[in-house]
Image (tube, rainbow, N blue to C red):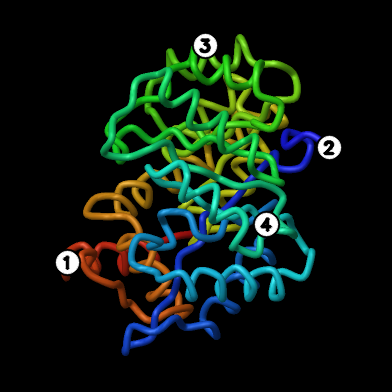
Amino acid sequence: MSLRSQLSGTGVAIITPFKKDYSVDYEALGKLIDFIIEGGVNFIVTLGTTGETPVLDKKEKIDIINYTFDKVNNRVPVVVGIGGNNTDALIKDFEQYPIQKAAAILSASPYYSKPSQEGIFQHYKALAEACPKPILIYNVPGRTGRNVSAATTIRLANEVPNIGGIKEASDDMNQCMQIIRDRPDHFLVVSGDDALTMPQLSLGFDGVISVAAQAFPSQFTAMVNAGLAYNFNLAQKNHFKLLEAYDLLFVENNPAGVKGFLYELGIIENVLRLPVVPLSNSVQEKVKTFLKNFK
């Protein structure tokens, strides 16, 4: 079964809630998982960068994966994030992490190293050949420092059987159109940018891996579902209702923004591990005001 048939629609890159002592708050994580599934989302991504994975140790990651599978209990597919800039280490992670129940592995392109396009191709080819699950490319050059070009994406889609799709977060709409135009039929293309999801759906994107849908699962999912049905009048209305929220979610840092929203919703404590800190008081007040007035 292709990723396109399994993971179209709204996916959510979930946070890692922490207690005030900075330990993982599994009670809050369970509450969050129920909240977003009941809101109608189609799948969950655990241990993406929104989950503050750079500051989680290996045991915490394994425990979070296991807890997430148990709590989701097959209600929706689960994607596990395993990415980085050490190809051999990632291949070892595939053997050591409990990914048997995963629908796919979301893997961000190598950060900081800034490999050539050939280096990026060979990196993903090596991962795909070693991984027992389909690989979902994550292109986010604003964080990694290197874009995965449309040509490299299409080459991977056509030449490497276990590359199942891409989370595209380049903010380059021309690149997005090239990928949609040239992709093979099985290849999943989802947005990695909440604010661009609605226009990207009009181009033919299959959905999104969202941060906003974590705080607004029913409203954001309604927007995505309308876009997938090419009902762009309804999609646009839902999109514009959330436009200010998109800014607040990312104005200082992700996941500080979404944690600020989830704190106001009473789902988590507003705790992050350094080097990321909670929203400034002024932005947090704007979050509170937005939620108070949101309908």
Structural distance between the alpha carbons of marks 1 and 3: 39 Å
Per the rendering, the mark at residue 1 is: 2
Q: Secondary structure at mark 1?
A: loop
- Residue carrying label 1: 280
- Residue carrying label 3: 178
Q: Left or right: 211 with respect to 257?
A: right
Q: Secondary structure at mark 3?
A: helix
Q: Secondary structure at mark 4?
A: strand
Q: Nearer the viewer, mark 2 or mark 1?
A: 2
Q: Is residue 164 depicted above or below 220 in this figure?
A: above
Structural distance between the alpha carbons of marks 3 and 4: 28 Å
Q: Secondary structure at mark 2?
A: loop
Q: Give the mark, 4 or 1, whose residue is nearer the N terminus.
A: 4
Structural distance between the alpha carbons of marks 4 and 1: 32 Å
Structural distance between the alpha carbons of marks 2 and 4: 15 Å
Q: Is residue 141 depicted above or below 80 in this figure?
A: above
Residue 292 visible within the image: no
Q: Viewer-proximal residue, 99 or 3? A: 99
